[in-house]
Amino acid sequence: MKKPSLLMADDHRIVIEGLRNILTAHFNLVGEASTGRELVARAEQLKPDLVVVDISMPEVNGIEAVHMLKVLGNPALVVFLTMHTEPAYVARALEVGARGYVLKHSASEELVEALQTVLAGGTFLSPRLKTLESSPNTERVPRRSASSGTALTSRQEEVLRLLAEGKSARESGAILGISPRTIETHKYKIMDELGLQSSAELIQYAIRMGLVGKR
């Protein structure tokens, strides 16, 4: 029986290498990509049955790349493989058309099952996401609604976009040419101005305002 074709996108080569043996036992790994733009180009060229992609990717984040593929009419079934556990990311991933969402620390146990599930027409979410959602310490829906009329400066928007796309304070600072401490200062000032209580609420606000993937 012919194996389903698979394209994998992650900017950390070690992740792809670590999963290669597990994946090739069940799928035909036809290509790899290390940036969001490369993912779109390779998916259009190869037309794989399946795409496994991280959210935090250079140039174009994984969510925006998948959105671009869907706009192009690419038929690949998408499973996100990521470290992000925030509900806002899961919701956005499903919104752009993903059929699976697997956490990286569970990849060796869950990724093959997730891919087989989506091939069979189902949806797969890492069971740990449900555990996190039910935890009393989980950051969930904002306790106070941020006003959509609150005006952020252009620099604040840049900082918020990068943080919401999964960049660390160090990575964001390097991109913007400022220190990680300044990034953190901007972050907490934004949260204070918008009346947000947690990082999850900050991400939800950025997605709601269309800042994720904005250039």
Image (tube, grey):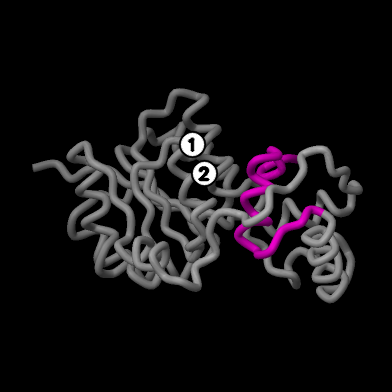
Q: Nearer the viewer, residue 17 or 136?
A: 136
Label annotation for residue 209: none
The residue range painted magenta reads 194-215
- Is-magenta flag for residue 85? no
Q: Quadrant of residue 181?
A: bottom right
Identify the residue at the far left of this view: 1
Q: Is residue 16 visible?
A: no
Asked which secondary structure carries label 2, the reply is helix
Q: Quadrant of residue 77?
A: top left
State the separation of the CA atoms marked 1 and 2: 6 Å
Identify the residue at the far front of this view: 144
**Number of other residues with Cα within 10 Å of mark 2, as a class: few under 14, some 14 to 19, many 20 or more:** some
Amino acid type at mark 2: Arg
Amino acid type at mark 1: Val
Q: Is residue 61 left or right of residue 22?
A: right
**Number of other residues with Cα within 10 Å of mark 1, as a class: few under 14, some 14 to 19, many 20 or more:** some
- The percent coordinates of residue 142 (x first, y second) are 62, 55
- Quadrant showing the C terminus: top right
| Residue holding disc 2 | 92
- Quadrant showing the N terminus: top left
| Residue holding disc 1 | 96
Q: Mark 2 and mark 1 in contact (Cβ < 8 Å)?
A: yes
Asked which secondary structure carries label 1, the reply is loop
Q: Residue at x 77, y 43 (%)?
A: 147
Q: Residue at x 84, y 44 (%)?
A: 150
Q: Residue at x 33, y 54 (%)?
A: 125
- The percent coordinates of residue 139 (x first, y second) are 55, 64
